[in-house]
Image (cartoon, rainbow, N blue to C red):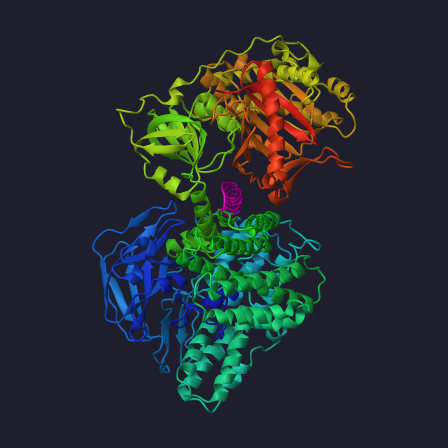
Amino acid sequence: MASAARIAASRVCLPSFGRDARVRAHRTVARAHARASNASDDDAVEVRFRVAAEVGFGDVVFVVGDDDCIGAWNVDRGVELAWSDGNIWIGTARVRAGQMLEFKAVTRRASGDFDWEGGDNKRATIVGSRGDACVISARLGHGECDVSTSDEGAPMAAPVEAQTVEAPPAVVIEAESAPTWSGDVRLMQANDHTNERPSTMKWDVGGLAEGSAVKAVVLGDKDGGSWFEKLAVVANEIGIGREITRDKLAACATYLRWVSTGTIKCVESGGHRRPNGPAKVGRGIFISMEQIQGAMYRHGTDLGEVERLLMRHIHPWLPSFNEEFTTAVPLTRIRDIAHRNDIPQDLKQTIKHTIQNKLHRNAGPEDLVATEMVLKQITQSPGDYSEDFVREFKTFYAELKRFFNASGVFERLESLVETLDEESQPLVTELINAHNSLDHAHDGWFGDEGHLIRRALEVATELRAYFCAGLSTGMRNDAPDESVRQRHAWRQAEMALEEYAFVLLSRANNVMEASNAMADGDRNDEAWRYASSVSSYALKHIGLSGWKALEASTTAREIATWSKSGSATRDDESARRMKATLQRTKRLIESHTNAAMDGFLRAPVELANAFGLDAFIGSTFVESVIRAGIPFQLSRTVTMMMYAVESKVQGDGFDPIVLGEARGTLVELERLTAESVRAQGDHNIIALVNEVDGDEEISSAGLNVKGVILRQELAHLSHLAIRARQDRTPLVSALSADALSKVRERLGKETFMSTTAHGTEIRDFNASSDSNASCADERVDSVAPIACDTVNKVTWIAIEDATLMNSGAKAATCSQLMNLAHKHGNFKAPEGFVLPFGCMEAAVRDANRFAQLLSTLETVALDNIDDACAAMQEFISNTLPPDAVIEHVCSHADPGMRLVVRSSANVEDLSGMSAAGLYESVIGVDAVNVGDVQRAISEVWASLYSRRAVLARRVAGVKQADARMAVFAQEMSANALSFVLHTQSPIRGKTSVQAELCVGLGETLANGTDGTPWRFEIDRNTGKVDVLAYANHATSLRSRATPPNAGQVVVECVDYTRQDLSTSVEARNAIGKKLLEIANTLESEFGSAQDVEGGFLGDDVVVVQSRPQPQ
């Protein structure tokens, strides 16, 4: 139970990298050093602030007051507090003894806003003398505060009767990465141990789902008071032979942590539960988890990344099952210690009854706490006890730490050094030396302190990678005991190195912030190299923990590469490129955060409620897990780097996508849906939308939506952006904390939004200068559906024969593209076939049922529209085109050919009604597999009746019965790059062409939400290519070009250091020249601005679609 390593039985919270007594935490953060008051060393007192505050996720609490040491009322220089369990925020400063401080608690919201607590200032007079610690305890929102001196240096009298010692306040350390002990510890002179459970404890399973893991754990705990029995509860859920599921892992991880930190108390249960019992149970749990996660050896459940993340929150709480702890009578040294004749009788009785008898009867995590307390007593005043006794007790304490998996990182490494190869062994010594030197280095980021932090982080990363490589193959189900024990030791070592890396990253961030390291100055090149190295190591650790390992390592390589030649802010191009990778890093961090929340879900809350624990214990559990992880520290580093690049490109934090003006009440919506908009009433709104998937239809959500602000990146030429442009709805992304803060300040207020190529304004409406009308008020009425020539049986025609009347605008345009490709020779257009209008209806076997479903769609209320659409789509999905027809068309295909099956509706790709992305496309369809082609066609047919499509037609005033769907299929091009091109830039107008490009197939661009593409503005007169954004999609869709899997669509991670468009001006200019030529050709031929889709296959440009560009 490694994280019990942070149990604070005394008044010292031990370092987050383990409780090794030889490892001293760097207690005062660097920024506190930088802001220390003018107190001399002779009269300085360390002040420890403890502020109880329940704030939102992502918020941070500061102490700001009247003295320089706490910011002189400047929040930017205040003392930033660190979160710890129980919503206690902790921080330190050095102040003159006797000085009176006035201060307030200030909350920095996740949005970047600062909230000062109300009421009078808090006042505290600093007590104590040199070397003392003064503790100031306060609660956010309450004016009073308590002041006390730490009794850390006071001698501990030998107990003469049983006493309960509550865990005292924890001292702030460099980083709080795990919880402290929250139970009580009994020191006793007689056998006063009890089997009584706390009176506040309950086991209320009412409301818990039958068969749920949470209910099983609660009922198991009710019948098991001892630690052994509680471990058995976990073994019954995820032990050997049990199916391991996400809900079981979440419940067990939460439960084990609370048991191991005293939140759930262990009591006597009768009989003897020596340490070997828990050790054997822990062994079974460990084996069960290890056997299902190897790359080579894997048995049983096939786990995903979320489950692997949860398992990492179980390993630290399991006891060691090393050979010394599985013997019949382990840990016998304490018996000899308790019978020594060179210690006082009262101390002897305390050791015997508090530790020896308890440990050998009912071992539990509280035994380690009690041992730490006694150790502190006997070492308080050197010479009070014999050296031999103290040495023996320390040896026992080290054994007990090993049993509870509480050893420090350096103890673990030293014990394992002989198992490393010759190249890795010296790294252990180097890491220990760097750590020891850090205790005395306080000269900032560019001095020895920064160098030692970075080197220690590098070595810790290298060592952890060595251990993880050895563990990666997995564990055989017939592995011998010695192999299992070694694997356990290596697993604990790599996790201890992860925790130590967290500590180093925390200190790195503190020192960087204190030094204002990322400011543009003489050492900017160094600053970027150093910050990039720290970020890269953090990313590597995330990958080593099993979270998106390839993505993490690729992103780390990008950050390191972009900084290799100097500052990322040396010019706009470098800044934009680094910005793209930092945005990619932020998405990776967010995915890890979401995984933790999705993994634990409501397990902590349900367990806390069932056990009768304080509500905050369950509600803050996941936040504590997130804050204790390396991604949290990485987010701090990335924020500093992002601020620097944003300042360089002089952005306002907004990304304008669709220009225009809007007026309405600013509201926040989780998703942009008709239901969420309707809940706001009928008045005009500007919507701050937390999440989009790129398929939204703004007008379908509500005609009163006059403007949209997104909280995520979006491709400018994505389907959502095109629809917003057609609806004339201003659309912008708020990507920086400052931009989001400006938006949030106006929630609930009447707001004017103006989005131009030069910036975005969010402010009060000015009646004297602002237009009363929003751009969305001028939405163009959609045209009527085109008249159709329908067939009365299912048939196919070549794409060259497609016309507007028989196949719709999209298919007809593809026919024209084939002719233009032949005429101009500067691009290619794929061949294909079409199932024209009328085929879907002809394929329907139950015409009456179809008519009934269609009639329902016409009149159904919004509340029931999901069911009506689902019924129609299911009906059409089961309507397959006849075998004979598809067999005939497939007979013309070459083996290995892959198709893209697309829609061509009579209400699509028309001027004023593009319906971009409204209907389905199916990619990678095997052209000679009749069944696959049939199902793809039916899927596209069914998309005519998706919820989005039905609502879009309602808003446009088109009857559902008037909508028709033709389907066409083209040979899929295995593009190396794909593009969307607007022949007249939505930002710069007719003088420029805007293009967005991505690696691989174009579906990445169509969605537009998982990252940004390369965004180019190409000057029509000069051909100059301006890069507005660099690509940062984490993955691409690639079509394999060679046998045996030719045409198969795969997802691949993208490394932009190997993409010419990110590294070569010449490559960008060459692409820009070709795109400009295509733009001029198609705009001239079609007579209007065009929205073009295509790709690059070798030296060829392939154009697959062109439609009128929304204006």
Residue drawn at point x = 36 percent, y = 33 percent: 761
What is the residue that sits farthest to the bottom in this orientation? 341
Asked if the magenta segment contains residue 585, the reply would be yes
Asked if the magenta segment contains residue 157, the reply would be no
Image quarter of residue 157? bottom left
Nearer to me, 378 or 705: 705
Residue 1078 point in image, percent of width and height: 61, 23
Image quarter of residue 429? bottom right
Residue 859 point in image, percent of width and height: 46, 17
Nearer to me, 471 or 64: 64
The main secondary structure of the magenta stretch is helix
Compared across the picture, whether 242 is left or right of 362 comes to: right
Compared across the picture, whether 15 is left or right of 1020 comes to: left
Nearer to me, 465 or 609: 465
Nearer to me, 50 or 79: 79
Q: Is residue 65 above or below residue 984?
A: below
Specify start and end residues of the magenta stretch as a single range.
Answer: 570-591
Residue 852 point in image, percent of width and height: 54, 15
Q: Is residue 732 above or below residue 444?
A: above
Residue 453 point in image, percent of width and height: 50, 63
User: In this orientation, does residue 554 appear?
Assistant: yes
